[in-house]
Image: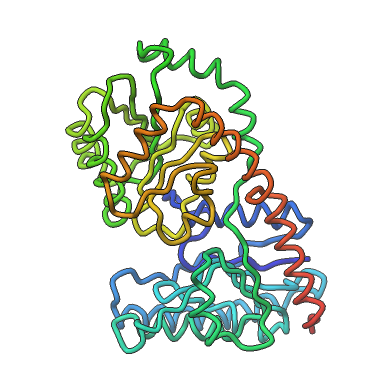
Amino acid sequence: MRIAFYAPMKPPDHPVPSGDRHLARLLLQALRYSGHEPELISRFVSRDGKGDPERQARLKALGEKLAARLVRRLAARPPEARPEAWFTYHVYHKAPDWIGPAVADALGIPYIITEASSAPKRAGGPWDIGYRGANAAIARADAILTLNSDDWDCLQPVATPPVLHRRMFPFVDATPFAAATARRGNLRDALVRDTSWSGDTVILLAVGMMRAGAKQGSYEQLSAALKELSGDNWRLLVAGDGPQRAEVEAMLEAAAPGKVRLLGALPAERLAEIYALADILVWPAVDEAFGIALLEAQAAGLPVVAGKARGVPDIVGAGVTGLLPAANDPDAFAAAVQRLMDDGDLRTRMGAAAARRVRAKFDLPTAAAMLDSTIGTVAAARPSA
């Protein structure tokens, strides 16, 4: 089917990398994999991160104008070139969809949301306009796919029956990570040559943007945990960049002098290689819905140590593919990392289980099948005009 694709928080071709952008790209890839024809229908960003009612009102008005213009443009296409369904990724009070519902209504096509949330505490507050806009889109949806296990409780009272709700897990394309893992020996040898580290050094890896807020919070907790690690035969690689890089680098170096190496932002192929040569993915995941890096690491056969919060337990099997210490507890986090550092057999077992679990549950073909089934179901129930 021809799918109008829209990501109101950040378009998939936005120049600044983020988890949202990455997942938007993966969704496009999954739609194509299942035989659909997605079209990036708008790059309009509706996000207001500060809670500014005047800005939200302007964004709402602009979004409504863009929707009307888009309706005229799409209606002028021949029927065989018009979208047959609308697909919006990530709707919430900071980034409502002011465009999709109006266009879907005008064209008589299904309206589908992947990853939505509704926060009743935002009603009447500084994000009230965005909250009401997000709820209006949620109420219009023919299908809602939730990526977090705790989202549906707040969405269900807003959604309009007979909305189709399906639980969809975050996912990755495991193929490049498996390919890189097959070259692990050569990649490790190259690292030893480049760094003069010993071949049996335990390589910890952290992957995350370096920006204020939750990401910096994860780096702060990681730094606190590093101070508690014993032994000298370990090193930390860090993949990521951002405006807080200087602060992050300073705190990590202070926590583990001479043991930290920052790699900056890496292209996808090189990042897959870094996962493959590492031993443990370490990430506190402060206030993260799930964290794509946790899945990427497991796809590459790495055990994970991550904070047990929000959607993290949905994608990391506690005691099976990694260890999930209590959230916001650097001492517990350090103990979990130390346990894996000291037990190579456990690392091997968990890493192998992680790769198998990603292929079985969190890989691109599984997500593509879920999307295809959902689109087919709502299209059959609500045929195009």
- Residue 186 at x, y = what percent? 55, 15
- Residue 145 at x, y = what percent? 61, 69
Circle count: 0
Q: Quadrant of the C terminus?
A: bottom right
Quarter-of-image position of residue 247: top left
For residue 236, side relative to residue 349 (left or right): left
- Which residue shows up at 64% across the image and 29% down it? 179
- Residue 64 at x, y = what percent? 50, 83
Q: How is the image coloured?
A: rainbow
Vertical arrangement, residue 79 with respect to residue 245, above or below: below
Vertical arrangement, residue 179 with respect to residue 209, above or below: above
For residue 157, side relative to residue 205 (left or right): right
- Which residue shows up at 52% across the image and 72% down it? 116
> Does the rendering let one see residue 84?
yes
Quarter-of-image position of residue 72: bottom right
For residue 360, side relative to residue 132 (left or right): right
- Residue 159 at x, y = what percent? 58, 85
Quarter-of-image position of residue 27: bottom right
Depth check, front residue: 268 or 67: 268
Q: Quadrant of the N terminus?
A: bottom right
